[in-house]
Image (spheres, helix red, strand yellow):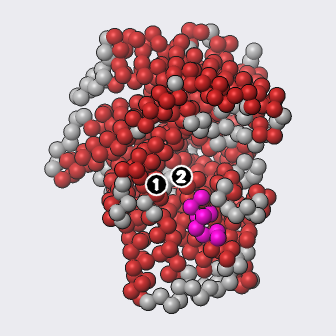
Amino acid sequence: MDIGTITLLMGAAIVLLMMLGVHLVFVTGSVAVITMLLTFGPNALPLIASRIYSTVDNYALVSVPMFVMMAGILERAGVARDLYDAMHVWSGKLRGGVALQTMIAAVIMAAMTGIVGGEIMLLGMVALPQMFRLNYDRKLAIGTICAGGALGTMIPPSLVLIIFGLTASVSIGDLFLASIGPGLLLAALYLAYIWVRCWLNPELGPVSNEGQNLSLAEKIALLRGLVLPVGVAALVLGSIYGGVASVSEAAAVGVAGAMICAAVRNALTVELMVAVLRQTMRICGTILWLTFGASALIGVYGLIGGTKFVAGLMAGLPLSPLGIIMVMMLIVFVLGTVMDWIGICLLTMPIFVPLVNELGFDPVWFGVLFCLNVQIAYLSPPFGPAAFFLKSVAPPDVTLQEIFAAMMPFIALQIVALGVLLFWPPLALWLVG
Amino acid sequence: MSRFSATLGEWMAPLFLVAVLISVYEVVLRYAFNAPTVWVHELTVLLSAACFVVSGLYALEREEHIRVTVISDRLPRPARRAVALLNIGLAMVFLLAIVWGGWSHAWEALSNWHRTRTAFNSPTPAILKPLIVLTAAAMVLQILVNWRRNGPNR
């Protein structure tokens, strides 16, 4: 059987099994094993266990549980909620003020965590009822929360960038720095969109008079809620940027900082730590084992020459180098509508990144492009995880259709940001040395 | 079996915290006292890696592994049962391949107590390789237990 046929069969098997609802780790893992048995026979099987070993025996991977812990502690200690309340001080007389406040809070939260689910659920519980109560346009409110929450993957620390860095052997510190510019551009586009819409049509985001009667002292007291978490985020990014610590060490310092935040608020209890540690274990279990399955699959595929086959296929396209990058982005986008980002990253990046290097592009830039694309995948129907996270905490009259419809303008803005970065790489690379 | 999976996961989880504390200790020692250690780096990897491996069993017991449920939730009951069986079958293929392909290397690493041959020379391979095989074997059992626990309604 030639490699093209094998590729088609493997792809078809993966999509079919995935759609049927087989656990992703077992889909990728078993397709890998079966392909291996059919092509090399049982002698190749030790490869799978040894790939698992080399995956976990990696210092950079240590940052994954640490960032998960950091986010978990800050969230459970109520730091994130305080942050949102502190933003209220500024939302006063502006049209659409609460939506703008939500978006800014989302950006700061994104700098404290790399996990999207928690952020969207928290904003959904805190900000959505408030915007509904103040008669905000429902779609604007819903879109703001989902798009803002999804920024968690774009603004460092971001699990997407960590996994990309590991898969593509690119410096995670560089990726973090490179994602700051595009992340802020995205946030600025969202803010401008909310502001312009509310300015053109004040009914979308009515001015509220709440928060106007606060005294200066009260405002300062609220702002205190901001200092610690922003300090932790700055500490983590600063130590990576300043070259003081590796990403994993910076993450550990971030956990310590989060624990201090919790202690200051008298929230650092044994129960809190136990809950956070168990949550970390669960998240690692799902992410890491998915990685094992996908790495077995891509390992086998590389052995039978598939990686070269696809790279050759793409390099042979009658397109400019930038055109090939666009095709890659299109593939990621299409996969993103049905597949989890970890799976996409692990399966496609070992094929794409060598080609990106060969074409003379910076893999750091490509990583940030990928990350922006994952943002779109988070929102886009039919499997946009952001919608399901929000649905799980929103009032029952908010339907999935409404959520997906609300996201459309924000998806358009994400595509704009992707285009800007595609044609203007310095947006990402100006911070990278 | 379920209790074993859950308890093991819960007892291993604090190792993450240990990894955090020793990493902070290392950063402090290196920058405040200019005295880096040789053991923090490797021990952090070993502790985290052991947790990573076992976390798969923990997540399996809690049935939290990622899957696309949008279509399967709408299937009629017999079809869902068939998918559940298919899931078990494919899980077996993957997990048994890990056990079958990995055990001889694992046994070799353990019986010769393979070390990393670095300054700290930790027994990382001797611990992790058997742990991967044992966890995969435990996951085989756990998957059968999950199936029985869920009953014929899946």
Q: Is residue A61 above or below residue A211?
A: above
Residue B137: image tag? none
Residue A71: image tag? 1
Rounded to the nearest angstrom, the CA distance separating label 1 from label 2 is: 8 Å
* Residue at (34% x, 25% y) in the render: B124
Look at label 1 and name its amino acid.
Ala
Of residue A186 and residue A255, the one placed in the foreground of this image is A255
Give the x, y percent position of residue A198: 69, 80
- Region in magenta: A121-129
Give the x, y percent position of residue A296: 57, 25
Give the x, y percent position of residue A121: 60, 58
Q: Is residue A122 magenta?
A: yes
Q: Quadrant of the N terminus of chain A?
A: top right
* Residue annotated with mark 2: A115
* Residue at (20% x, 47% y) in the render: B29
The reply, left or right, for residue A10 in relation to residue B149 is right
Look at label 2 and name its amino acid.
Ile
Please say whether residue A292 is visible from this viewpoint: yes
Of residue A139 and residue A212, the one placed in the foreground of this image is A212
The reply, left or right, for residue A180 in relation to residue A36 is left
Asked if the residue under mark 2 is in contact with the one under mark 1, i.e. CB atoms within 8 Å, the reply is yes
Q: Chain of mark 1?
A: A
Q: Chain of mark 2?
A: A
Do discs 1 and 2 share a chain? yes
Q: Quadrant of the C terminus of chain A?
A: bottom left
Residue A303 found in image quarter: top right
In terms of secondary structure, where does tag 2 sit? loop
In terms of secondary structure, where does tag 1 sit? helix
- Mark 2 neighbour density, 10 Å: few (under 14) some (14–19) many (20 or more): many
Q: Is residue A249 above or below residue A242?
A: above
